[in-house]
Amino acid sequence: MHNIIRRLFLIAIFIASISGSIRAQIGGYDTYKFLGYSNSARIAGLGGNFLAINDDDITLTQSNPSLITPGMSNNLAFSYVHSPGGINYGFVMYSYDFKKVGSFVGSLQYINYGKFSGMDASENPTGDFYASEYALNIGWGRKLTPVFSIGANGKLIYSQLDTYRSFGIAVDVAGTYTSKDQAFTASLIGRNVGIELSPYITNQRVPIPFELQIGLSEKFKHIPLRFSQLLTNLNHWDLTYFDPGDPANQPDPITGEVKQKTGVGKFADNFMRHIVLGAELTIAKVLAIRLGYNYQRRQELKLNGKAGLAGFSIGAGLKIKMFDLGYTRSTDQFGAYRNYITLSVNLQEFVKKQ
């Protein structure tokens, strides 16, 4: 069965590769980019912005609603991320199961860009202003068979950038296969299918960042180790960006020609930009150690001549009774880090003890 699922997902990858948009350099074309950020410490610890791990972790459902299960009913979670430049974001979420219609998760996702000093064209101060964005999410999930589940998120989005305001709606749809022994999981996700209802500038709507993704994870039978592979941006093949400031892109002083990668090198570089790798080691079902590698993030954010650990992330999770605490430190570039803190509380266990 596992091999059949793998083949189906490989077919999906192939179809996405040949039918997806070939538009290059997708950055700057979309709005509401915060919808695709890693909010959960566990997700960030494994390098990506979603996961295909079906173990009743409520913090994974904001990006993969097909993981919503009755087992996370009455769970509450908070997440906070501190990133370079003083930008802060995160979420609060709660889950409840309605036996007849399925399980639901409600969440409020936010990002605060901080305070800015306004200037006019002559550099005269015009006063301070703020920028922030919010998304109210309602997620639903249900098992169709013992191994297949589906889910969807509905989102109301609000953005305020100084005097400019925008309102939009979007949905995520997802399907997940989980083997009977819970060792192998595969998810197919279409994220942020939506529209900007009220744009920042009248009659100038900007697309919402739709993304087609596939997630795979597999746990060893005799070792408490799980590997995660994420395939991202399957609807966009070319994710490269030409940086004129990169020394490798400078013209030859004699011929004036710019060195370019060979066909194989260019293909390999583009292919790896769609791959995110992660590993999670669980010790005594209490402590989890996580490591992630995001090639695209490394290529986009590394400093010339000083890449350091750009694109790598390391984290840990501690589970004690009804509490699950996660922390991750992700490296954007040398000297620039993001710190993720996530706390989940199983209120159902608290009620039982009472």
Image: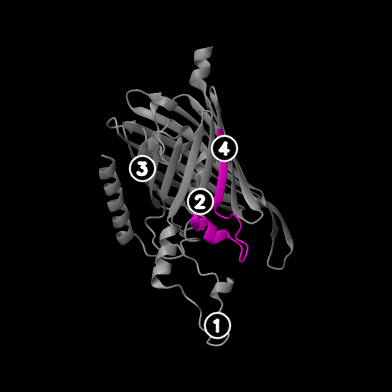
Q: Is residue 40 left or right of residue 16?
A: right
Observer able to see residue 272:
yes
Q: Which residues are magenta?
A: 293-317
Estimate the spatial distance between the alpha carbons at disc 4 and disc 1, rounded to whole Å.
47 Å
Q: Nearer the viewer, residue 80 or 264?
A: 264
Image coordinates for residue 107, horizontal then vertical, percent: 49, 35
Estimate the spatial distance between the alpha carbons at disc 1 and disc 3, rounded to whole Å.
46 Å
Residue identified by numbered label 1:
252
Estimate the spatial distance between the alpha carbons at disc 3 and disc 4, rounded to whole Å.
24 Å
**SS at badge 1:** loop
Image coordinates for residue 142, horizontal then vertical, percent: 33, 31
Instruction: Name the front one of labels 3 and 2.
Output: 2
Task: Point out the tag, 2 or 4, that comes first from the N-terminus.
Answer: 2
Residue 297 inside the magenta-drawn segment: yes
Task: Point out the tag, 4 or 1, that comes first from the N-terminus.
Answer: 1
Q: Nearer the viewer, residue 108 or 271?
A: 271
Instruction: Name the front one of labels 1 and 3.
Output: 1
Task: Point out the tag, 1 or 3, that comes first from the N-terminus.
Answer: 3
